[in-house]
Amino acid sequence: MGNFYLIGMPGCGKSTIGKEISKKLGMVLIDADFYLEEKEKRKISDIFAQDGEAQFRNLETKYLKELSENKNILISTGGGVILKEENTDIMKKSGKVIFIDTSCENILKNSSLLGRPLLKDDKNRIYNLYELRYEKYIKSADYIYKNDKDIKSAVEEISKFIIKNR
């Protein structure tokens, strides 16, 4: 059995939906960003500030490879994981990729976004990021969930896909 990877924009619901799916299906959920922070013993914002985005992306790939060696786990990825084609290849070879597609308007309702390194206290950058990343999300995905309903609906629909593809 392969893994299941949740991809999408920052604030689209990957972590929240992932937690509920893991409870419902009894799956282990790993947040790839938290995993990276634990391994590096520092925050992503510090990695960006001290080493730059390119180094962060290299670390993201390193730890995605580690996570991909597991079986039948749910992995909530960072929003930019699809920026490197190598990451998409890793996910595709080791499981199924689920794109949680959420409108920028819904994402902007998430007040915790301002701390994200790429948004730099400018929530409007989310529109630029969405435009730059959207096609990569689509190309990476085995399943696209349009997240415009409540969390219960998201959990039900994505869980059906996971059960079908286990």
Image (cartoon, rainbow, N blue to C red):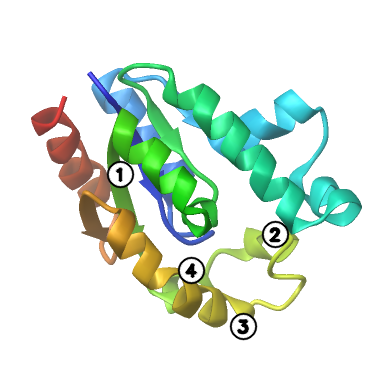
Label 4 SS: helix
Residue 107 badge: 4
Amino acid type at image mark 1? Val
Say which of marks 3 and 1 sits in front. 1
Name the N-terminal-most of marks 4 and 3: 4
Q: Are marks 3 and 2 in contact (CB under 8 Å)?
A: no
Label 2 SS: loop
Q: Is residue 69 above or below residue 62?
A: above
Mark 3 to mark 1 CA distance (whole Å) = 27 Å
Name the N-terminal-most of marks 2 and 1: 1
Q: Which residue position is annotated with label 1?
A: 97
With 105 as the anchor, is 57 left or right in this view?
A: right
Name the N-terminal-most of marks 4 and 1: 1
Mark 3 to mark 2 CA distance (whole Å) = 13 Å
With 50 as the anchor, is 43 left or right in this view?
A: left
Q: Which residue position is annotated with label 2?
A: 116
Mark 4 to mark 1 CA distance (whole Å) = 20 Å
Residue 71 badge: none
Name the N-terminal-most of marks 3 and 2: 2
Q: Are marks 3 and 1 in contact (CB under 8 Å)?
A: no
Say which of marks 4 and 2 sits in front. 2
Mark 4 to mark 2 CA distance (whole Å) = 13 Å
> Where does residue 69 sit, x and y in percent of width and height?
43, 19
> Where does residue 25 sit, x and y in percent of width and height?
25, 23
Disc 4 crowd rating (10 Å Cα; few below 14, some 14-19, many 20+) is some
Name the N-terminal-most of marks 3 and 1: 1
Q: Are marks 4 and 3 in contact (CB under 8 Å)?
A: no
With 125 as the anchor, is 10 left or right in this view?
A: left
Q: Which residue position is annotated with label 3?
A: 124
> Where does residue 5 sit, x and y in percent of width and height?
37, 39
